[in-house]
Amino acid sequence: MDDLLHLARRMMLHAHAPYSKFHVGAALRSEDGSVHGGCNVENAAYPQGLCAEASAIAALVGAGQKRILECVVIGPGPEVITPCGGCRQKLREFASDDLPIHLCGPDGLHRTVTLGQLLPMSFGPQHFG
């Protein structure tokens, strides 16, 4: 998880958050072991910005990957930061309920949960048969 945390921290430093001042970074490990990062990118035309998890997913897909095996999300403060509802659903598109999501702050890991804990009884690709 150290490589993911390092990348998520770096991504958080590159966030574009001039409105909220709330910088978030995310990093994902794909099925082939590659690591993909993203940061939040705000826009004056709310809600047109991107969450860190969504931009990390875009990087993963752009690299030709389709499966997430591990996720790190890092926020700027001492409180536990979790993916928003929309990002939980976006993660679900590329991961199963047992996806470990490491919730971190600047001081490191705060807590690890699964996607299933954050998005119980989720709707996913398997519902389309």
Image (cartoon, rainbow, N blue to C red):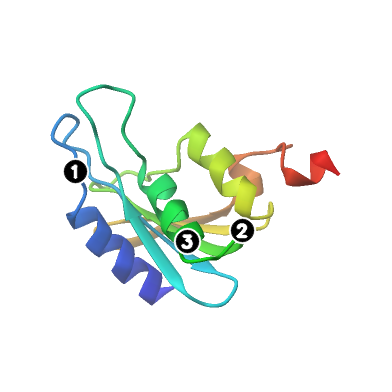
Measure the C-alpha gap from mark 2 to mark 3. Answer: 15 Å
Q: Is residue 36 left or right of residue 88?
A: left
Count of numbered marks = 3
Disc 3 designates what residue?
60
Q: Residue at x 26, y 58 (%)?
A: 11
**Marks 3 and 1, the one that precedes in the sequence:** 1
**Marks 2 and 3, the one that precedes in the sequence:** 3
Could you tell me which quadrant the N terminus lies in? bottom left
Numbered mark located on residue 43 in the image? none
Q: Does 40 sit above or below residue 70?
A: above
Q: Amino acid at mark 1?
A: His
Q: Is residue 51 left or right of residue 106?
A: right
Measure the C-alpha gap from mark 3 to mark 1. Answer: 20 Å
The image shows residue 86 at horizontal and vertical percentages of 51, 34
Numbered mark located on residue 16 in the image? 1
Q: Amino acid at mark 3?
A: Leu
**SS category of the residue bearing label 2:** loop
Verify CB contact (< 8 Å) between mark 3 and mark 1: no
Write down the quadrant of residue 68 in the picture.
bottom right
Could you tell me which quadrant the C terminus lies in? top right
Q: Residue at x 41, y 58 (%)?
A: 59
Q: Residue at x 53, y 64 (%)?
A: 70
**SS category of the residue bearing label 3:** helix
Measure the C-alpha gap from mark 1 to mark 2. Answer: 27 Å
Verify CB contact (< 8 Å) between mark 2 and mark 3: no
Front: mark 1 or 2 = 1
Disc 2 designates what residue?
99
